[in-house]
Image (tube, rainbow, N blue to C red):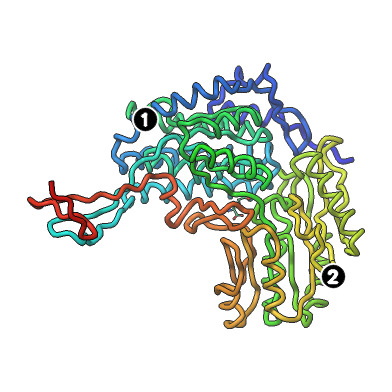
Amino acid sequence: MTTLPSAVAEARAILDRLGVPASTLDGGTLAARSPVTGEILASLPEHTPARAAAAIDAAHGAYLAWRQVPAPRRGELVRLLGEELRAAKDDLAALVTLEAGKVISEGLGEVQEMIDICDYAVGLSRQLFGLTIASERPDHRMMETWRPLGVVGVISAFNFPVAVWSWNAALAFVCGDSVVWKPSEKTPLVALATQALFERAAARFGPDAPSGLSTLLIGGRAVGEALVDHPKVPLVSATGSTAMGRTVGPKLAARFGRALLELGGNNAAIVAPSADLDLTLRGVAFAAMGTAGQRCTTLRRLFVHDSVYDTFVDRLKSAYPSVPVGDPRAAGVLVGPLIDKAAFDAMQSALDASRAGGGRVVGGDRVEVGGPNAFYVAPALVEIDHQAEIVKAETFAPILYVMRYTELADAIAAQNDVAQGLSSSIFTLNLREAELFLSAQGSDCGIANVNIGPSGAEIGGAFGGEKETGGGREAGSDSWKAYMRRATNTVNYGTTLPLAQGVTFDV
Ligand code: UN1
């Protein structure tokens, strides 16, 4: 077993620099753990549901004030947040590495994604456009206006422990909403650091940023439920498992709250006969092994055309063992740890099930690094003849199932034949194949790509997926509309009162 340098002192030093007081890090019941070394980094006090409810009430008060601040001015706060994130990028990224186990470049990428959405939201703050609509009545004008919504609840997962908050929060702030955030209990420290950076930005912005505009709730399921059940939270944006979504969705529906759900993915790629195999190899490797297979957009299923199967899969099989697995703080490492033992166990049982179903497994073994409480694995590639039940389930670990196809229509049908619908790709130089894949007869996912893998989306597009992925869309395009209330306004500037549809009602 290779031992690694402790993560504790470094995490504490970063938290101190980012403005999280050391006095808040000990004596509580929530253990913040590093998957890098398995060490406990801090023991945080948790919110009780009652305190969470009081914080949500305060956030509602903040919204009542914030909605009166003009949107471009609200954008200025988000601009300052972007500045704080730029200044703290290296530190926050290093903390993401320590607490979520991402390799350095991906930790930096995560913070860059936060900066990108801030920039996007600043521009958006001057573009919250509505329409004017032709009225059927004389001397009438119709328009739609977009109004702030209220408190936006954000429930985020460990794998994008801060970026997911920013996709929601940056938009919510410019839209005139306040935000209450329940981060994953596996990654509370990066959330504390992000909240501290927000507070720096708010202090620079001045008194127009009401206290309670951004609130962090530390705790487990009970705190999440307090957020989901609170009547003053009109929108909850929740990222996590489909099982979590099945709990959250109906609870919100029961009180007519809005749900923005980003749930499981079981993303596929098709490698067509004309694919540029060098490019495809790189695309597949990053999408399947990057983030140790712990992105919701991770490539989990690969359909390779019979004519290139042997060539391509042989290359893939020799690339897999050469990918450096280990301390994510070390230069050159591409695959860090799994988040915890439960993730490791789930991976092993999926591999056992694959073997039982006739799958031929390369990799997947534990890599002895970091001590007994750290779980590093060699990414696994499983050749399998058909899409068995285990292939259709999302296992949040680096397992790539590889299957052979001969007809593109069959490959597309198989790629769509899972419960999830997040992301998908085709590697082809054939225009007809590419366009078919993107067409109505093609991928049924919220994201469909050509000649890049399914992961690593930019913030300019709407991010999210269909079916059991939950249907929500975050980040770019017109995703901001989920964070606002659309009002249709009809104005009569005439002297009579003609009724629509020709109705008469003369009194
Ligand atoms: C997630 O894994 O929850 O497209 C989100 C990507 C990232 C976001 C992943 N931009 O892979």
Q: Position of residue 30 (x, y in %)?
A: 69, 25
Q: Residue at x 32, y 42 (%)?
A: 71
Please tell me whether residue 240 is drawn above or below residue 187 in the rendered image.
below
Q: Residues within 10 Å of mark 2 (few under 14, many from 20)?
A: some
Q: Secondary structure at mark 2?
A: loop
Q: Residue at x 45, y 25 (%)?
A: 57
Q: Residue at x 54, y 29 (%)?
A: 216
Residue type, mark 2 in image: Asp
Q: Position of residue 325 (x, y in %)?
A: 79, 51
Q: Secondary structure at mark 1?
A: loop
Please tell me whether residue 305 is drawn above or below residue 140 in the rendered image.
below
Q: Which residue is mark 1?
A: 209
* Tally of numbered discs: 2
Q: Nearer the viewer, mark 1 or mark 2?
A: 2
Q: Which residue is mark 2?
A: 385
Label 2 CB, ligand 1: below 8 Å?
no
Q: Between 13 and 286, which is closer to the camera in this rendering?
A: 286
Q: Between 135 and 376, which is closer to the camera in this rendering?
A: 135
Residue type, mark 1 in image: Ala
